Image (spheres, grey):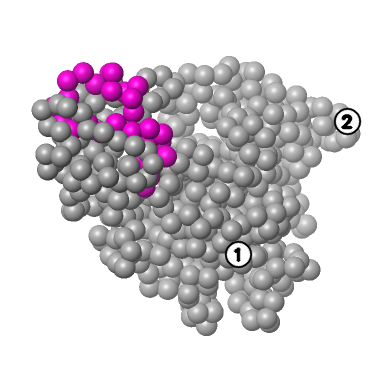
Amino acid sequence: MRPRKAAPVRVSAIAEFLQAFGAGSAANQGPHPADAGVSVSGVSIDSRDVQPGDLYIGLPGSRSHGAAFAGRAVEAGAAAVLTDPDGVGQLGECPVPVLVGTDLRSVVGPLSRLIFQSQPAGVQRPTLFGVTGTNGKTTTTYLLNSLLRALDHTTGLIGTIEILAGEEAIPSQLTTPESPQVHGLLALMRERGLTAAAMEVSSHAIAYRRVDGVKFDIAGFTNLTQDHLDLHGDMEDYYRTKAGLFTPERARHGVVVVDDEWGERLVRDATVPVTTVASAENADADWTVTARESAGLGHRFVLRHRSGDVLNCHTGLPGDFNVINAALAAVMVLESGASPARIQEVLHAADPFTIQVPGRMELIGTEPAAIVDFAHNADALERALQSVRTPDSEGRVIIVFGATGQRDQGKRSIMGAVAARNADVVIVTDDDPHDEDPAVIRTAVYDGAARTKDDESLGCELHNIAPRAEAIAAAVEIATVHDVILVAGRGHEIWQEINGVNHSLDDRVELRTSLSRRGFIPVPGITVES
């Protein structure tokens, strides 16, 4: 996740950088002071990831101080250590130069950019696209990646499912990695000659400063709905965190979907130039989705500019919401400098918006229709449920889902209510309970569904079934060839965490297995069993 070759940076230059940045620094008086000509060639904030020649940054943590692990970092080859005044007392005697600074979290990103030379001025580097929003980030980055490849770019991808540096795939643990890894990846992509890269930018990444020091050429916004309030507290803080991406420090240009009030507000608040996109034909936007029509599981649509220019588009992805994801990707690439004529050419010749995004409206079977999706909040769940119920549908919609433990508890009953309103059979089960009692989580979701069913006189069936594999099997057992089974919440994930232990569980595998047991034929070649 870093370049093979990196130009060394003198520790004395890092000290000067810290002083100029306002973080302050001073070398210790150990056997190897900072002015002894020592250089570093990488950065790490995790002693387990240190490589020879790194600067190890010991940050304060919730349970322990990173400086306590400096000895391990030095044993692994760290050439210098940076920590704060509290960390100095935990270092003991250190055989490498030690820099001391303040507010170190704010400096990790810019310092990583300096050392890795991830986005140097005047040097050819990948055009960088960033996508933020509550829902649609992963799909939009995959659509961006597909369109850019069709335009003959060599591409990179950083996101929830995987990290791609050209053809090399690296499993992803965070939606956005820590800032030393981000800058290392961008430097690696530049070293390999990649010409474009797309990155998911979560609110956690912005709040925890994982994208500090990164400058996006084009930043895109999908939508904002209730999620992650365990971190942000309220929607206002959630919005302001997302809006922080649309500033001159982080982006050169923004593309914003204005289908909700948050997108409209972002256009007013952004301090970079913004292009707007909307899915409603009567919207006041630069680009508007028009002439939408079903095409198999996907859609055809026209993307029309206020000037009258048009792009004729198609996406084979199920889900009405994937139309605006595809539209956003197209406009972001347009704003990066690609010509409308060239984009239209590849849209026609290569159909780049018809791809399989792992765990995002992923089709596992057709009779019954069996779909796995990552929808894990109320808005995404409602969109997914509405998208699988077609006007000519003869069967029922069966939903299997749960809620994550140790996360925004307020959304649990809301998700239950959404399921009751939009599905014929609701099977509540476990998601990732983490350290919470799974039964308590299920009860909160189930009660939200039950209250809604009673208050609104709905005719849906309600079930509470655990473990999750049994819930999926139960959905398949009651399904007919005319029904739709939607397994929501975990998408591409292959581990379920219960009390700190990861248990192997892939919804796609469980669904394929259950379909086969009943004699239904799964779609071949879509998923790889974990």
Residue 455's label in the rendered image is 2
Disc 1 is placed on an element classified as strand
- Cα distance between the residues tagged 1 and 2: 44 Å
Circle 1 or circle 2, nearest the eye: 1
- As drawn, is 325 to the left or to the right of 99? right
Amino acid on which disc 1 is placed: Val
At mark 2, the secondary structure is helix
Q: Sort mark 1 into few (<14), some (14-19) or many (20+) by Cα contacts within 10 Å.
A: many
At horizontal 68% and vertical 58% (from top left) the residue drawn is 268
- Residue 183 in the image: state x and y as whole percent: 34, 49
Residues under numbered marks 1 and 2 in contact, where contact means CB atoms less than 8 Å apart: no
Residue 371 rendering spot, x and y as whole percentages: 59, 47
Q: Residue at x 24, y 52 (%)?
A: 3
Q: Is residue 287 above or below residue 527?
A: below
Residue nearer the viewer, 456 or 205: 205
Which amino acid is tagged 2?
Answer: Asp
The image position of residue 35, as x and y in percent, is 15, 39
* Residue occupying the point 44% across, 68% down: 148
Tell me which segment is drawn in magenta.
84-111
User: Disc number at residue 379?
Assistant: none
Q: Specify which label sits upstream in the sequence, 1 or 2.
A: 1
